[in-house]
Amino acid sequence: MLLRIAHLAGLQLLISCCRAFACHSMESSDFSLPGDYLLGGLFPLHSGCLQVRHRPEVTLCDRPGTFNDHGYHLFQAMRLGVEEINNSTALLPNVTLGYQLYDVCSDSANVYATLRVLSLQGPHHIKLQGDLLQYSPKVLAVIGTDNTNQAATTAALLSPFLVPLISYAASSMTLSMKQQYPSFLRTVPSDKYQVETMVLLLQRFGWTWISLVGSSGDYGQLGVQALEDQATVQGICIAFKDIVPFSARAGDERMQDMMHHLARARATVVVVFSSRQLARVFFESVVLANLTGKVWIASEDWAISTYISRVPGIRHIGTVLGVAIQQKTIPGLKAFEEAYASADKGAPRPCPKGSWCNSNQLCRECQAFTAHRMPRLTAFSMSAAYNAYQAVYAVAHGLHQLLGCASGACSRDQVYPWQLLEQIQKVNFLLHGDTVMFNDNGNPLSSYNIIAWEWNGPKWTFTVVGSSTWSPVRLDINETKIQWHGKDNQVPKSVCSSDCLEGHQRVVMGFHHCCFECVPCEAGTFLNTSDLYRCQPCGKEEWAPDGSQTCFPRTVVFLAWHEHTSWVLLAANTLLLLLLLGTAGLFAWHLDTPVVRSAGGQLCFLMLGSLAAGSGSLYGFFGEPTWPACLLRQALFALGFTIFLSCLTVRSFQLVIIFKFSTKVPTFYHAWVQNHGAGLFVMISSAAQLLICLTWLVVWTPLPTREYQRFPQLVVLECTEANSLGFILAFLYNGLLSISAFACSYVGKDLPENYNEAKCVTFSLLFNFVSWIAFFTTASVYDGKYLPAVNMLAVLSSLSSGFGGYFLPKCYVILCRPDLNSTEHFQASIQDYTRRRSST
């Protein structure tokens, strides 16, 4: 039942269309040719009306003033191709091709022609069966049509029957969808490649701020959408987008509004993805609005169309670049058209009796052509005509294989459209040096020319400045061939915001990422070229100044052995050690002399040894910090200097007791002597510092560390002791001992001259305090590479002041004043002190 309803619906539709087109009782003989196998041809010999229809109506094609030169050349290209094939002995020998050609000036004419080619031989109706494998329509394949909308309609109607439809001009990407249009093929490239080529063209010249205009219909609207999608992915922003409606007229309110927005968009580049008819309306409006100084990117449909280049006043619009199908020629087409025009075509013949006559197989203008009055064959029409010519040959080669003509004779068997479709999809042949074949989506292997309009005298000419091939899509342009409209032939700029300086990130202003302000990257960050909108932080081992485009490796710094500063400190410390060793030897040699005994006797060796230990700790400051060096360098100095200060304190205290309190407090004096008070004090004091140091090393263990915060470009290798509580406690303990030593020395300032060490000890301790105050002051303002050197200098100053203040005067007496190193001199000094005490 459903099949019968469909059958009746199709039959009624066909009858309705036929009645509508049966307004003429005449038809041109040029539209049909008998043959063993028939092809259908759909060509726009006349132009349709672009006005929006509000009532259902049929457009009659053969109307005065609507003749379409471009469609005429396509029409003749198919006729020439069929004639050449029929005259060939190599292609389809002993087989004759025929055709039924139709003028598809409108959608209604296109539907009628499609139904006609689908109709069965004889009954002239479409029969929908359960099994369409045996369906044999009037034609085996169809060549057409001129635009995407009509091609989609025809392809949808032919697809259930798998009748091959090869379009010479419909380039919409949707027609490549084999689920919807399984029998559609084409000899013109898909808009997919045109869009990719346009995006590459925009990228080539750095145009990131563009306006986009399309035409109503699948070609323009789908092209604009695809271009917007791909351009956006590539970082190109659309400043303005609009569609020219079918009802548009040059200068009407709708077009004036579009021109106003184009001018306000501030985009130098305008991509016009439009059909020829609406592109003319658009550029007539551009001329009226005096919109000049722009770069216009043309889509393939109008890029080299004289219909557009001859718009009055178009010369001043700016620069026009476009994507065009590679210009190819059909050998003999011009001569074929001239022969057709010169031939006696006769009057249109009446409809055969009993057949249906129709107005879309009639061309009265064609009948009137002469050798001196005929359409001019332009490069644009020649390229399109070549595609139609190529489609005819593709069908012929598919039929050649299907009929087994390779043996020299064709079988003339019954052929069904779906069988022919399988063979056409497999064709691979050369036609005038060009390879003809189709990919899985029915698209050809082809390429584009990049053209530029060049003003020569009274008209535009089209210059090929490059090419585009695929896949993948590649662009090759000779920029020197382009004549730009600006000063000095410079490439115009079309950007919303100029590129930022190196190391400046883009801060988007508004909705478009192409409109931005430039802000320098902060120190420690850099601008990665893969993301111009966000500064990236450098790695831990890297640094970057303000406004940097890259990060640099940080310089690792520490107090190396080979530096000049290190050599000076090493020399000074080595000298101090040698002096300590020399003094120890000198004191050992003069151990029994009064000077050495008064200095403490054997206690001096402990003092010298502790100073030597502190001096030895300085070697831990040189080179890259290690774990043992960090553990010992400060702790060893602290402990050694504690022993020295303890000995100095107890020595000064002991002299005070002997000379001042031995008679006044004899019990305390005897207890001090009998219990070895001096040794006990040194041991307890040193043990206390040892306990502090061990606690420091266990709880606040000094470890090698890499310091990143103080200097952005440096990694400072150091130990962690300076900021620990243990270091501070050890230092404060030594400070307390220094004050004690100073106090004991000051109390004994009036002792006998040979025992009075107040001046020297005071000087050495004062120098010690100054050294450490200077170190801590420096450390508070400087944290650099040479801070360990400053620390060493403070340590060296403390050790040198202790050695110089206590031992150097005694060495001087031993070496230079041996007369003062005698028992008599010391006794005389004591007697003088006793007399002074008695007198007071």
Image (cartoon, helix red, strand yellow):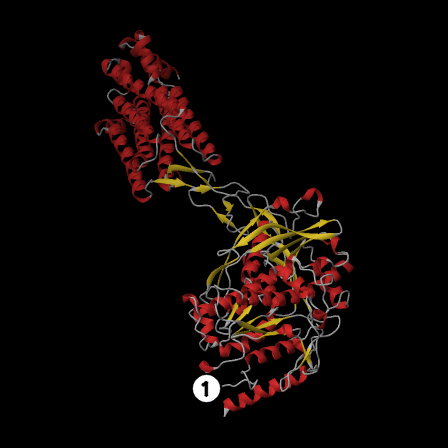
Q: Eyeballing the image, is 700 above or below 156? A: above
Residue placed most toward the observer, 816 or 629:
629
Asked whether, in this view, residue 712 is left or right of residue 718, the answer is right
Quadrant, the C terminus: top left
Residue 302 visible from this viewpoint: yes
Rendered location of residue 258, percent (x, y): 72, 63
Residue 189, given in percent of the width and then of the height, sits at: 55, 62
- The x and y percentages for residue 598 are 28, 17
Amino acid marked by disc 1 = Gly
Viewer-nearest residue: 622 or 596 = 622
What residue would you read off at disc 1? Answer: 130
Q: Residue furthest left?
A: 674
Is residue 327 or residue 525 the one in the foreground? 327
Q: Residue at x 50, y 70 (%)?
A: 177
Q: Residue at x 77, y 68 (%)?
A: 253
Residue at far bottom of view: 1
Residue 169 can be seen, yes or no: no
Is 753 placed left or right of 213 in the picture?
A: left
